[in-house]
Amino acid sequence: MPRTALAAVHDGHGDRLAVREIRVADPGPGEVLVRIAASGVCGSDRHVLDGEWSLPTPTVMGHEGAGVVEAAGPGVTDVAPGDTVILSWYYPCRRCRACAAGKAWACTGTRANECLLPDGTTRLSDAGGVVYPYLAVGTMSEYAVVPESAAIRVPADVPMDVASLIGCSITTGVGAVVNNARVPAGAGAVVVGCGGVGLAVVMGLALAGAYPIVAVDTAEEKLAAARSFGATHTVRAGGDVAGEVAEITSGGADYAFEVIGRVGTIESLPSLLTTGGVGVLVGLPPQGVRAGIDVLELAESGKTLIGSNYGGAVPSLDFPRLARLYLAGRLPLDSLISHRVRLDEVNEAFDAMRAGTRTRSVIVFD
Ligand code: APR
Ligand code: ZN
């Protein structure tokens, strides 16, 4: 039976979300209805609200969420009502070459980035017509209808707020370390930008046994948080960051992660590396942005720059793995959550993110 849900909707103008009712239709073939329990407030939603990326509107925002399957459409076999699931914001088509090669993060058949289900429609609407779920999940809503390939079952004893973060920031950050960069134990690493995603990179580096782990941020609170997650050294942005990193790492880091999406910090990434070092681009800039690098220096010193999207993850493999590491006490994911808020406090959560005053807000539904 179709139902209504309270959701945080971006109407396409301004950076304020409207918390209002939408209609949610039944799941179609291969789709599931998920009652959302928690949704993280992630930097990518902010890019959209601040006009840096364009989307079809109106859009239910949120792409970092977890909940419980309430109903399954015809033909669903992966999950069943009652299952605890984390939503993937890049559902794989399971048919393209990337999917066949086990690279779900590089799927070319998905319509997630168009905010559409595989059949090109959505299950959301309001009086004005179609409503789009951001990245085909739209987790800032009491209900979501997603393809079964976007609903990844995890053990029910993972707390929902922690589970929601595995849906984006944790997978993106830890995955950048273990899947994309494949950092070996003992390598020196630097993380520029310690928001939710950057702190997940720090956690991933600690898990991998990197040393030293240097955290860089403009905000002192973020540096303190980075230390609690395993950073061995911290550097306040603004001064001679490259000089300080060179001193701590005895000549430059083996790996440097940019986790903001700012042109200036992207351009300076090679200067933090030793010869043969690897720079990892995790932060996403506004659409169309270009960066300049010293090509001769990059080539002569044998440095590499790699892109990292969704931590190079296969959610059906990585979500349960990360959940198990959390349950085993190997990843302190609950400490990442600085604020638990109600859906109608979503705008304040984005303002706090813009001001850099919170590590991570999570919207918790009743
Ligand atoms: N130098 C160092 N740190 C900075 C600078 C700077 N010039 N400017 C901002 N920062 C820090 C902020 O203080 C904050 O701690 O970068 C961090 C950005 O974190 P958030 O805004 O919380 O964003 P987050 O959710 O972590 O996402 C970061 O990763 O996946 C992408 O789309 C996402 O581009 C976004 C990025
Ligand atoms: Zn995200």
Image (cartoon, grey):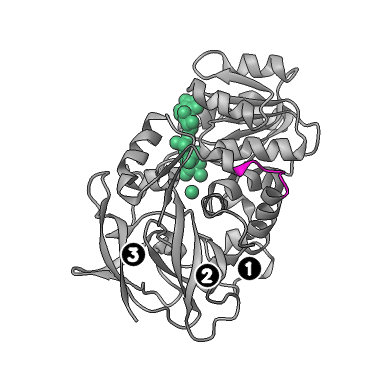
Image height of 114 relative to 188, above or below: below
Quadrant location of residue 294? top right
Left or right of 132, for residue 246: right
In terms of depth relative to the viewer, which is nearer, 266 or 24? 24
Q: Is mark 2 within 8 Å of ligand 2?
A: no
Which comes sooner in the sequence, label 3 or label 1?
A: 1
Residue 99's disc is: 1
Circle 1 SS class: helix
Residue at 31% over, 43% down: 347
Q: Quick one: label 2, few (<14), some, or many (20+) residues within 10 Å?
A: some
Which comes sooner in the sequence, label 2 or label 1?
A: 1
Q: Which residues are magenta?
A: 328-333
Q: Tell me the quarter of the image containing the C terminus.
A: bottom left
Q: Are marks 2 and 1 in contact (CB under 8 Å)?
A: yes
Q: Is residue 262 magenta?
A: no
Q: Nearer the viewer, mark 3 or mark 2?
A: 3
Circle 2 SS class: loop
Quadrant location of residue 152? bottom right
Residue 181 visible from this viewpoint: yes
The kind of residue on which mark 1 rests is: Cys
Q: Nearer the viewer, mark 3 or mark 1?
A: 3
Q: Main SS type for the magenta part?
A: loop
Cα separation between marks 3 and 2: 18 Å
Residue at 38% over, 79% down: 26
In terms of depth relative to the viewer, which is nearer, 26 or 155? 155
Q: Quick one: label 1, few (<14), some, or many (20+) residues within 10 Å?
A: some
Q: Which residue is mark 3?
A: 132
Residue 109's disc is: 2
**Residue furthest out toward the right:** 185
Image height of 363 relative to 304, above or below: below
Cα separation between marks 3 and 1: 25 Å
